[in-house]
Image: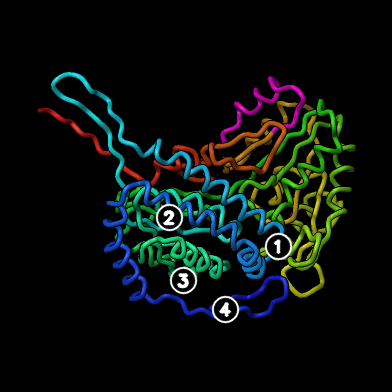
Amino acid sequence: MKIINPATEELILEIAEDSPAALQEKYRQLRAAQPAWAAKPLAERLAVIERYYELLDEEKNELAQTLSNEMGKPVQQSLNEINGARGRIRFFLDHSAQYLAEEWVTTEGGTKEKIVYEPLGVIANISAWNYPYLVGTNVFIPALIGGNAVLYKPSEYTLMTGLAIQKLLYKAGLPAHLFEVALGAATVGDALLDLPLDGYFFTGSYPTGKYIAGKVAHKLVPVQLELGGKDPLYIADDVADIAGVAAGTADGAFYNNGQSCCSVERIYVHEKIYDEYVAAFLAEVKSWKIGLPAESGVYIGPLTRAAQVTLLEAQVEDALKKGAKLLCGGKRIDRKGNYFEPTVLADVTNEMLLMREESFGPIIGIMKVPNDDAAIALMQDTEYGLTAGVYSNDFARAESIMKKMNTGTVYWNCCDRVSAGLPWSGRKHSGLGATLSHQGIRAFVQPKAWHIRG
């Protein structure tokens, strides 16, 4: 496999894909190592993760450079991601003991009863390229804390980061063969589905998630799917600081080049403030520096995948044919690398691909609406259900709208954020199950009921 720098199109490294025999051997080693790890006191498992937490900070500059080289995000954003991952690890370190402890339900009478939480066993973590530290941390950290072994498949676009994570975990003291990396693209991911694993945790697209769920359904093991979104945002007419809201929501749409599951993907603005909002939004977008990830001050780097440039071009073409107005951008940048101009379209409708299908790039459609009811109807018009946000000075007004959103997350006066203390979940085509929060700790263990008489 060739790892290509998306900013320069230069070859970084070649790595051999795992053969079926190699995957079988990694699985065998994981299965053999897992019982001893599960038998260790929780405090010992936490100590390993605590050291990994420290090493992430000690080696963050080198790790960030590697991530930027292979994935394309600006180095500062790679550093932000690593720091964000450490925040999530801190949550797991501080709260796992509480939620993994045995629970006594009945302590009096002839029969006593308790619940004990035991690891699933050997789980697959099929991870994503857009935030490999963050989305990986959601899975493999609580999985290891819970006593599991992990067969980790990084995206083929962030293989070096996947190997760096493995190296750091072993450096932190994780015993051998508890975290094996499956190296390869789709065929290797498919091969994992045939292994007798005890759970599958996937982050990626709806079509792939649907395929995984169908392929492993007969095993009756836990399957969690963190999938995409077409996340809507409504800007009500009572916001006080329109320019500030425009700048913040532009960042919510374009941070990481729009390559985030919870990026703002469509914006509905009350007609009373529409013109002022759009003007301020455009001013913010046009102020950003585009360039190589290592350049100081760069906000927009290359897209990770070359194919995404073609998809964005198709969305722009479709929108313009259906009456949208191009306010800025709209095409690939004439330079080496997978660069696409930050793109803003107005006069959009929900019939356009731009407003229906996940873009995962630096592009946004902004639509004028006459009232809250119109915004609600348009926000609800989607197959996805990841996040939805409302900006308004009136919480009661925003709360009424948020209650109507069939999404795993809602935002008031903020967007594009994830908190370790809250469950991260999707509805409809945005996924199954939840990571993070206490639910994300218990996702990697199974309850056992004890009836004790004597």
Distance from disc 2 to disc 1, alpha carbons, whole Å, reads 27 Å
Q: Amino acid at mark 4?
A: Lys
Please name which of the two marks, 2 or 4, marks the residue nearer to the observer. Answer: 2
Return the residue nearer the eye: 160 or 87.
87
Residue, disc 3: 183
Quarter residue 433 falls in: top left
**Mark 3 or mark 1, earlier in chain:** 1
Could you say where residue 29 lies in the image, as x and y percent from the top left? 31, 67
Q: Is residue 402 magenta?
A: yes
Task: Classify residue 36 by image quadrant.
Answer: bottom left
In the rendered structure, does residue 143 fall within the stretch colored magenta?
no
Mark in front: 2 vs 1? 2
Q: Which residue is mark 4?
A: 2
- What residue does disc 2 label? 48
Residue at image coords 31%, 56%: 37
Comparing labels 3 and 1, the label whose residue is closer to the camera: 1
Give me the disc on residue 75: 1
Residue pictured at 74% horizontal, 62% vertical: 313
Q: Is residue 126 left or right of residue 26?
A: right
Q: Are marks 2 and 1 in contact (CB under 8 Å)?
A: no
